[in-house]
Image (cartoon, rainbow, N blue to C red):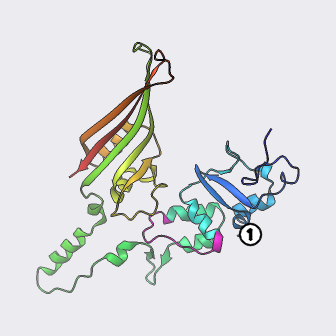
């Protein structure tokens, strides 16, 4: 029998079955959020407004811990929630996920937020992006006279070409912590490795270039492209898939290291041995 839980709105009472508690717990794509009920219904006719004002708690999907579940991007939902709190859009200086956030705004039926995220049209009908840093960082080239002018302009343009910038050299370290079990007397029925999580360390811009949408940035969000991180990890658990991506973008392995420990699953030494290991692979692109 479930017990009353005011934090997540779980209760056996008849009244709470049709009303929401003041504090709501959400599981959005695996990320947990805690907010007020009034925040979720701040925008009339939005998806969240319909969910938490037109429906009852028993009609909404929940996870195994009783949190209301939404199968959306958990990382981007933090900006949706920030917008609902005061109806203002505030993004980091470097924010490459603007188009994806607009897609989330459209899904949640937040029309004003979607408009704020729409690309702006300049007077010459070209699309501009107020958040893109490359526009403000582009150096101005003074007018030159003589036959070398066009060549100098070409060199300056090539030096800042996005295609060349995306192919710059650097290192990426891929690590994983795995485990496997060996039966008594090293029997052949060993359970092979179980990779818990694949971590990615290196420059933010290189990691995003290689792994793209498969990179989970929730532990180190809003990291500028020229900074380094050791807190990213991949959304899948296949090392070979990570190696294929690195090879595709011109990286090759230059070093690796590994450590391991052994333990028994219980105090009985005759029980299976559990080996745990941590391994790192260093990839380079020159």
> In the image, is residue 95 above or below residue 241?
below
Residue 193 can be seen, yes or no = no
Q: Who is closer to the viewer here, 257 or 163?
A: 257
Task: Point out residue 62 in the picture as x, y percentages from the top left corner.
Answer: 70, 47
Q: The residue tagged with tag 1: helix, strand or loop?
A: loop
The x and y percentages for residue 21 are: 77, 58
Q: Position of residue 191 (x, y in %)?
A: 45, 22
- Which stretch did the figure color magenta? 85-98
Work out whether residue 206 or residue 32 is closer to the camera in this orientation and state it.
32
Question: Would you say the magenta stretch is mainly helix, strand or loop?
Answer: loop
Residue hosting label 1: 44
- Residue 89 vs 73, above or below: the answer is below
Label 1 crowd (10 A; few <14 / some 14-19 / many >=20): few
Residue shown at the point (81%, 54%) measured from the top left: 56
Residue 107 falls left or right of residue 202: right
Q: Residue at x 67, y 42 (%)?
A: 64
Question: Magenta span has 92?
Answer: yes
Residue 31 lies in the magenta-colored region: no
Q: Residue at x 12, y 79 (%)?
A: 148
Residue occupying image coordinates x 71% and y 57%: 24
Compared across the picture, whether 261 is left or right of 81 comes to left
State the residue lying farthest toward the left: 147
Estimate the x, y position of residue 29 in percent, counting from the top left: 58, 50
**Is residue 41 rendered to the left or right of residue 252?**
right
């Amino acid at each position: 029998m479930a017990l009353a839980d005011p934090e997540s709105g779980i209760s056996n009472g008849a009244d709470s079955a049709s009303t929401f508690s003041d504090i709501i717990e959400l599981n959005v794509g695996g990320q947990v959020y805690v907010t007020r009920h009034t925040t979720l219904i701040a925008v009339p006719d939005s998806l969240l407004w319909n969910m938490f004002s037109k429906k009852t708690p028993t009609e909404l999907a929940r996870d195994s811990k009783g949190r209301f579940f939404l199968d959306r991007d958990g990382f981007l939902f933090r900006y949706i929630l920030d917008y609902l709190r005061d109806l203002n859009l505030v993004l980091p200086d470097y924010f490459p996920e603007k188009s994806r956030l607009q897609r989330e705004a459209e899904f949640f039926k937040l029309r004003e937020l979607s408009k704020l995220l729409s690309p702006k049209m300049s007077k010459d009908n070209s699309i501009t992006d107020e958040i893109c840093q490359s526009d403000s960082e582009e150096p101005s080239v003074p007018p030159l006279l003589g036959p070398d002018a066009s060549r100098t302009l070409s060199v300056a343009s090539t030096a800042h070409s996005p295609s060349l910038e995306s192919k710059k050299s650097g290192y990426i370290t891929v690590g994983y912590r795995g485990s496997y079990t060996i039966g008594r007397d090293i029997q052949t029925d060993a359970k092979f490795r179980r990779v818990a999580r694949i971590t990615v360390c290196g420059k933010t811009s290189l990691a995003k270039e290689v792994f793209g949408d498969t990179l989970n940035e929730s532990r180190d969000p809003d990291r500028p492209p020229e900074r380094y991180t050791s807190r990213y990890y991949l959304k899948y658990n296949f090392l070979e898939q990570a190696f294929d991506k690195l090879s595709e973008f011109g990286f090759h392995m230059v070093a690796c290291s590994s450590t391991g420990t052994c333990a028994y699953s219980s105090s009985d030494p005759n029980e299976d041995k559990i080996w745990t290991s941590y391994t790192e692979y260093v990839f380079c692109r020159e």
